[in-house]
Image: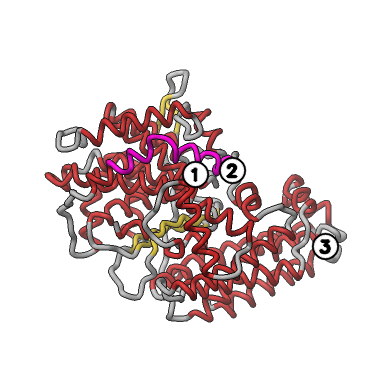
Amino acid sequence: MDRRNRVIIAISAITILICLLATYAINDGGEEVSRFDSFPKPVTDDMREPMDADEAEYLLSSTIDRFLEVAGTETTRAELEDVIYGLDEVTRQLAVDFLFVDWNHSRDPHADPDGYIKWAVLESMMDSRVNDACRTALSGPNVDEIMDILGEEFCRELLADELVSDEEYALMMRESELLVAYSVCDPYDAYALSEIYLDLVDVRNELADLRGFDSYADYMYSEEFNRDYTPEDVSELALKISGSGMSELVDRMYDKYDKTEVDYTYTDQDQLFDDLEPFIDGICTEFAELYDHMRQYDLIDFEDLDTKMDVGYTSFEDGVVYIFNSPYMDHYDLSALVHEFGHAANFSMISEPTDDLDIREIQSTGLEMLFILDSEYLLGDSTDDYAVSILTDIALVMMDGFVLDEFQQRVYSSEPDSPEDLDAIYKSVIEELNYDPGFDWYLVSHTFQNPFYYISYTMSAFNSLCIFKEALQDYDSAVDTYLDIVAYNSEGYTNMTETLGLPSIFDEGDINELIEDMLDWIDLQGSDIASV
């Protein structure tokens, strides 16, 4: 069960892409319509060598100063366009540079921690600094021309937002410093990690208060994740699920899991990539093209290095996408690469992909479900055991998310004072939900780096299991369902389920139907049900 300590982080900032693709679906009128409309751009050697933090700071500061100088005096539209587009180009360049800075840091966090701290602070504050400069420019003599260039709607929204105060800026910098401290901390030093987390809780609660929210959970749910349900909805759902047949399903799956043995290893990352190529190519032509692109430009990193952070994620900026992973060199890496490739497909092949994490995680985990039912070409007699192994992990993650989210809600609302307080809160949640994840709270990096993210794994696990259930009956239909979700670019979990006609975790009937079908499936293991 080592994989359950795995961090899967999807980081993205959506910008303009280049090149067009076309995978087709059939609309209500019987016409073919394109699902995908973008493709990532090539990566050059220069892009892989980002400037250092001091150079980046000078470039950003001087570009902002030049923009304010021109915007603050009466000038021509051409000069305004020159400095505005120049500022946009610099921020894009720095965003891509940080993409590779972050990649290098993930490969060896001890190589240059001080330089990374500077870069991380710059990156976290860049949007605020640029927006502040635009607000200043909009109070100057060229306001009409600037609004016309930037767009009136954008400018009105910008002016409606408050400037970042010195206090807020200091808190944001402190949060970045604490996150870097976490990244270089011994991942099993419970006391040191608890002290870092307690400081993060204090900082984040102050930020939420400054931004006008009653709680940090409310801030994250509504502002950062744009969820169309509340923390209270999740707490209520957690209690409902804990009293359903889900616990029985998890127990029975785990019993089967203990007996699984998957015969798969590989020697290097190229072998892993080769092994998965037939599956990815079989989903659709555009997936095959993206996979070839990422391999051609070395944008998938499963190199086995002792220095790597124990994380897996997909990162995307301005048409550049890469996958990072610290591998186990076994069958779990098959799932990890399939999972992250689902993220990469959405980030880079949809010009305006959704920011909704619940939906993003279906786009990744849903692809894992399809691979389970198409893995016999690679795993042979281990296929059924592989299915049990991965599906058990998915079911466990679904329950883990409820515990971790409730833990965070209580921590941020009660503001504990000591590591012992944190452990007591975690224990109380486990007892109330009658489910023990089997790992300590501090082993999950989302708790530090991506607070309130993990519940998205719960939401997505439910719909991913529904994709698996559909694929058992009709694999091609399940592929279509999955691709519709990858191409979905609106926000809101409940909105997506209603728009696409999908089961919802908030629907008790849908939950009970999935549990019954999965109980039937797990009882039939040993037959050919896990292959098509």
Q: Which residue is mark 2?
A: 227
Residue 509: image tag? none
Q: Secondary structure at mark 1?
A: helix
Residue pictured at 24% horizontal, 45% vertical: 255
Q: Secondary structure at mark 2?
A: loop
Task: Using a 10 Å C-alpha cutoff, classify the residue at mark 3 as few (fewer than 14 neighbours), some (14 to 19) or many (20 or more).
Answer: few
The answer to whether mark 2 and mark 3 are in CB contact below 8 A is no
Q: Which residues are magenta?
A: 230-252
The answer to whether mark 2 and mark 1 are in CB contact below 8 A is yes
Q: Is residue 88 left or right of residue 507?
A: right
Residue 513 x %, y %: 38, 27
Question: Foreground residue, 34 or 212?
Answer: 212
Residue pictured at 75% horizontal, 60% vertical: 134
Q: Is residue 502 above or below residue 271?
A: above
Residue pictured at 40% horizontal, 75% vertical: 108
Q: Earlier in the sequence, mark 2 or mark 3?
A: 3
**Residue 250 counted in the magenta span:** yes
Q: Secondary structure at mark 3?
A: loop
Residue pushed farthest top?
Answer: 29
Q: Earlier in the sequence, mark 2 or mark 1?
A: 2
Image quadrant containing the C terminus = top left
Question: Foreground residue, 55 or 247?
Answer: 247
Q: Which amino acid lies under the numbered mark 2 shown in the image of this protein?
A: Arg
Q: Is residue 330 above or below residue 56?
A: above
Q: Quadrant of residue 384?
A: top left
* Residue 79 appears anywhere in the view: no
Q: Which residue is mark 1?
A: 358
Q: Which residue is mark 3?
A: 75
Residue 523 x %, y %: 22, 34
